[in-house]
Image: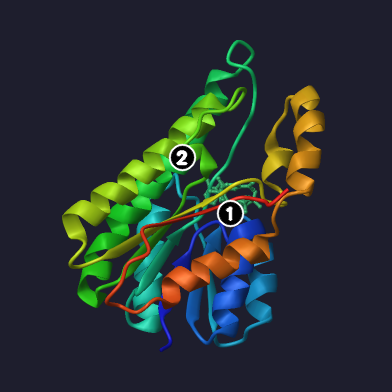
């Protein structure tokens, strides 16, 4: 059955791959991010199936407009995929306060804004929230403690939705290990970037993570995949 899906952070990596796969499977998708040129390029591959909207998840008005656009364009929201996220890695003693704040603003507060805006519509459709966590939702790694804290928060938010709303809204956390996307390139610490980049390049593909997202989306309504943890097998 075709679903009406919102994906945040769909201009690259996992979000872009998930939008492509879910569109191929016949769903209607509203993709959002800040880089709208990339969204337009994606939508052009799936005419009539993918619509676009600029949405910075740290902007409450833009998030509300995104949810409203899905309702106006497709008649409702069945799935909200909170994928937008960032990681800026640095040792604690070198870290910039604005980087810590930026990670919380996007990964936690931005995700919460989407959840807050989306829940009223998702309750109407017995819908589904998919949050991008990470293995960092479970473990804390050196040089990325604050990123790990944001992803621990994502898992806690998912759990709170499951506990309070499970009869009305399904919720899944997708928790990957290293995935080869643009993610690591945001790290400004050149030494860390150089040492981490090969691990990410040897990591999983965005398409593999998209398959896990689609698996959760396509599970029968009578079930709920709470979490998928997926690591590279190398
Ligand atoms: P990418 O950097 O390729 O994609 C990140 C996406 O988030 C981009 O589309 C970017 O779009 C968007 N984004 C960033 N900031 C904002 C913002 N303020 N508002 C809206 N969108 C924003 O990385 P990935 O695809 O790898 O990351 C996707 C998710 O997966 C993230 O939540 C990440 O934490 C998580 N993850 C990634 C792993 C990895 O190894 N790559 C491992 C585990 C989890 P734009 O800049 O156009 O706004």
Q: Which mark is residue 140?
A: none
Residue behind label 1 places its C-beta within 8 angstroms of ligand 1: yes
Q: Is residue 109 visible?
A: no
Which residue occupies 78% across, 47% down?
A: 201
Residue depicted at x 27% and y 76%: 222
In the image, is 45 to the left or to the right of 170?
A: right
Front: mark 1 or 2: 2
Q: Is residue 201 above or below residue 147?
A: below
* Circle 1 residue: 34
Name the image quarter holding residue 41. bottom right
102 left or right of 73 in image: right
Q: Are marks 1 and 2 in contact (CB under 8 Å)?
A: no
The residue carrying pointer 2 sits among few (fewer than 14), some (14 to 19) or many (20 or more) residues within 10 Å by Cα, namely: many
Residue 129 locus on image (x, y percent): 36, 62
Residue occupying the point 62% across, 74% down: 20
Horizontal relation, residue 13 to residue 127: left or right: right
Mark sitting on residue 137:
2
* Residue 188 image offset from top left, x and y in percent: 72, 29
Q: In the image shown, does 167 or 182 lie closer to the viewer?
A: 167
* Circle 1 SS class: loop
Q: Position of residue 62 (x, y in %)?
A: 42, 55
How much space separates mark 1 and mark 2, taking CA atoms? 25 Å
- Residue 88 sits above or below residue 27 on the image: above
Can residue 63 be seen in this snapshot?
yes
């Amino acid at each position: 059955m075709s679903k009406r899906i919102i994906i945040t952070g769909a201009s690259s990596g996992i979000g872009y791959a998930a939008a492509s796969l879910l569109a191929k499977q016949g769903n209607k998708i509203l993709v959002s991010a800040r880089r709208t040129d990339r969204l337009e390029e994606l939508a052009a591959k799936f005419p009539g199936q993918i619509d676009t909207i600029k949405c910075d998840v740290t902007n409450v008005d833009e998030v509300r407009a995104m949810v409203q656009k899905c309702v106006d364009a497709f008649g409702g929201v069945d799935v909200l995929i909170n994928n937008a996220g960032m990681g800026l890695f640095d040792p604690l003693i070198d870290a910039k306060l604005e980087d810590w704040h930026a990670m919380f603003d996007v990964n936690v507060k931005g995700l919460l804004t989407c959840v807050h805006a989306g829940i009223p519509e998702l309750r109407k459709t017995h819908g589904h929230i998919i949050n991008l966590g990470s293995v960092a939702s479970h473990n804390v790694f050196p040089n990325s403690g604050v990123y790990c804290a944001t992803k621990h928060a994502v898992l806690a938010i998912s759990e709170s939705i499951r506990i309070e709303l499970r009869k009305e809204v399904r919720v899944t956390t997708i928790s990957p290990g290293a995935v080869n996307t643009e993610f690591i390139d945001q790290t400004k610490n050149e030494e860390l970037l150089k040492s981490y980049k090969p691990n990410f390049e040897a990591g999983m593909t965005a398409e593999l993570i998209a398959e896990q997202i689609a698996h959760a989306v396509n599970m029968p309504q009578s079930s709920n995949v709470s979490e998928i943890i997926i690591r590279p097998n190398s």
